[in-house]
Image (cartoon, rainbow, N blue to C red):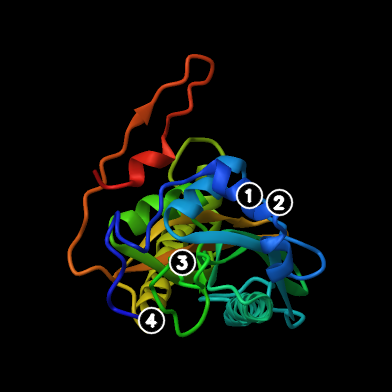
Amino acid sequence: MSANAPALGGPGHQEADLGELGRALAAGEASAAAGPGGVTSDLSLDEVLLLHSVGLEPVQVVFGIGCVSILNGVWVWGTGTVTDAHDAFQRAFSTAKESIRQQVHAAGAVGVVGVDVDVHLSPHRSEVVVTGTAVRSCTDEEGRNHFKVKYRSPFLCDLSARDFAVLSSAGWYPLDLAAGVSYVHAPRRGLGASIGQSVQNVELTNYTEALYDAREAAMEEMQAQISTFGGTGLVDAKIVDRPVPFAHHVVEFMVYGTSIRMLAEDHIHPELAVVLPVDDRVRTFEAASLRKS
């Protein structure tokens, strides 16, 4: 990828123009480039306009799936980590990401925004499904790209188009989805502790310690992936911590998010115009505010 990101307000960023978008669709430009099925996306209209403001446009909805088996007997009561379950998740996660990247390549896109990660864990398999909207650089009548960042491989991010626009306007860009997971057996309680805890409210130290162990392992794994991707941080982290539903003596800790890196020469502080609708408590901003004055 290029180390030089387009400056806010430069040729790489355009003010969202609904009329221009409508003319492009009417002329069939988007449909011709996306193929016989036309453009598909799960983005709202304001998100599409925000993407246009940073030089991108949706191409099509893409998805990937990975399903890896888990050996019999790994969930029986034991000690330490459930290594086989961990390896199954990471392999399923990698397979799903590779599958969605292949679709992005086929669509001629540069990355995927709004990725939704759906994880299903059962006694015998780990399944990961990722879906999102592939996006590509907008081109003008002369064929020039408005999104100047060059990625070696398509980026994946679970940021919404709105968050992506804010992030890129500040000079930061997503790289890839990073994830860490750990499954740890909670140690058995002694007979005396079990009897005592049945008649009073006390801390279940075995579960507490298992959760801490799982958290530390998962966070270290995710941070190692961020470094591998060349990122300097992670945003929009999602965390799942719970006993495994079908094996309550095993604690699960999972965390994933979007690794990012600043590609602009300097951090930019975009001036966002906050809008408070009178009929909705959701706070938003105008797409045109991303244009540097």
Total number of numbered discs in the rendering: 4
- 2 or 4: tag closer to the N-terminus: 4
Residue 94 in which image quadrant: bottom right
* Labelled pair 4, 1 in contact (Cβ < 8 Å): no
Q: Nearer the viewer, mark 3 or mark 2?
A: 2
* CA separation in Å, label 2 and label 4: 33 Å
Position in image of residue 111 (x %, y %): 54, 70
Q: Inspect this view and state whether residue 154 appears.
A: yes
* CA separation in Å, label 3 and label 2: 53 Å
Instruction: Locate the N terminus and report the quarter of the image it occupies.
Output: bottom left
Is residue 253 rendered to the left or right of residue 205?
Answer: right
Q: Which residue is mark 3?
A: 214
Which residue is the extreme one toward the right?
Answer: 36
Q: Which residue is mark 1?
A: 23
As helix, strand or loop, the secondary structure at mark 3 comes to helix
Q: Which mark is residue 26?
A: 2
Residue occupying the point 74% across, 83% down? 71
Residue type highlighted by circle 2: Ala
Is residue 72 rendered to the left or right of residue 170?
Answer: right
